[in-house]
Amino acid sequence: MENKFLYRLSQLLALVLGTKFLMVIVLSFALYVSTFFLFNQEESLKAFVFDFRVHGIILCALLSIFAGGIINQFYDKEKDKITRPFRTRLQSFLKQKYFLYAYVFLNSLTLVIASFISFRVLIFFLIYQFFMWLYSHKLSKILLVNNLTFVSLTLYPFFGMLIYYQTFSIKILLMALFLFGLLLVIDIIKDTLTKRVDLIFGYRTFANTFSVKKVNALVISLLVLLMGLSLLIVFKNGLHGILSYYYVLGIFVFIFCSIFFNSKQKKSQFYTMNILRLWIFIGVISMLLDGIIMKF
């Protein structure tokens, strides 16, 4: 009985890991914070809470991301045996057909919910799901296209909320460019950690196409660009509010990351990537605190 319980638990964990559950939790938090405190300029908290169209769109985004995680691991299963042995071993408890069933179910549920919201929302998520599949099937193996597509798909739900509220400004454009650049740096650094495996399985990345020196120069150049964007955002909005201090402190974080990434320290790439990931999460928290102070 105990062995059967552990087996079922392993199956559940396999499915959860296949959907990139933790990433989806962080994204859902970021979506709600950015939607209410950045894109939503007019609605009160009460109106926002009872705006079921917004909750429906965010739910559709999360379900699509769950499905995208599943189809991505389906195509990357051979590569994951080397790069993610623990997750692959857990997923061996569940047949691949069940992952595909979950993928079809989640995408279908997304489209049903989207159709109840509006036809435009339905088309929006059809496009999202198509490019999620195309990225996993083809685009993830094409140099530069893989990085740009991955980052674009990560930001796609935020773009949807921006369109929904029609809140366009220079401030939001600069912040979007900042986040795009930061995610791009993280994705390029991630490729440096798996460059040999990527090469074996036909994934062309900057890390396995160019020399270490050129890749380091690219990462540092992007970090310098992020410093410049941080300064532009601060000059545009002035040095007031928690979010402004986040961008100022970010300059020092990027300077440190530039030096540390280029050093010969063991696992410098791994630690740099996770420092930048943490900095994104700190940015979401800063937006939340800044929004609470400004709105309340």
Image (cartoon, rainbow, N blue to C red):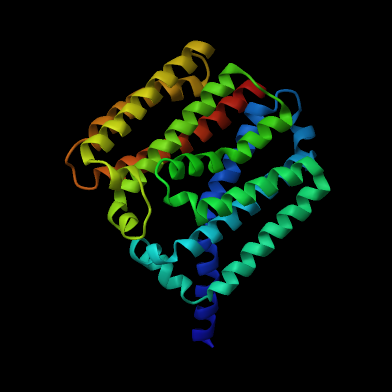
Of the 4 image quadrants, the one containing the N terminus is: bottom right
Q: Quadrant of residue 199?
A: bottom left
Residue in the foreground of this view, choosing between 124 and 286? 124
Of the 4 image quadrants, the one containing the C terminus is: top right
Residue lying at the far left in this picture: please name it: 264
Residue in the foreground of this view, choosing between 3 and 66? 66
Q: Is residue 162 left or right of residue 235?
A: right
Residue 253: x percent and y percent? 34, 29
Q: Quadrant of residue 154?
A: top right
Above or below — where is 30 with respect to 103? above
Residue 247: x percent and y percent? 44, 23
Residue 84: x percent and y percent? 38, 62
Residue 192: x percent and y percent? 30, 47
What residue lies at 56% left-to-right and 23% top-to-bottom? 173
Q: Is residue 55 left or right of residue 231?
A: right
What residue lies at 70% left-to-right and 28% top-to-bottom? 40
Q: Could one spot residue 118 in this view of the protein?
A: no
Residue in the foreground of this view, choosing between 275 and 203? 203
Q: Quadrant of residue 36?
A: top right
Above or below — where is 217 with respect to 82? above
Q: Could one spot residue 93 in this view of the protein?
A: yes
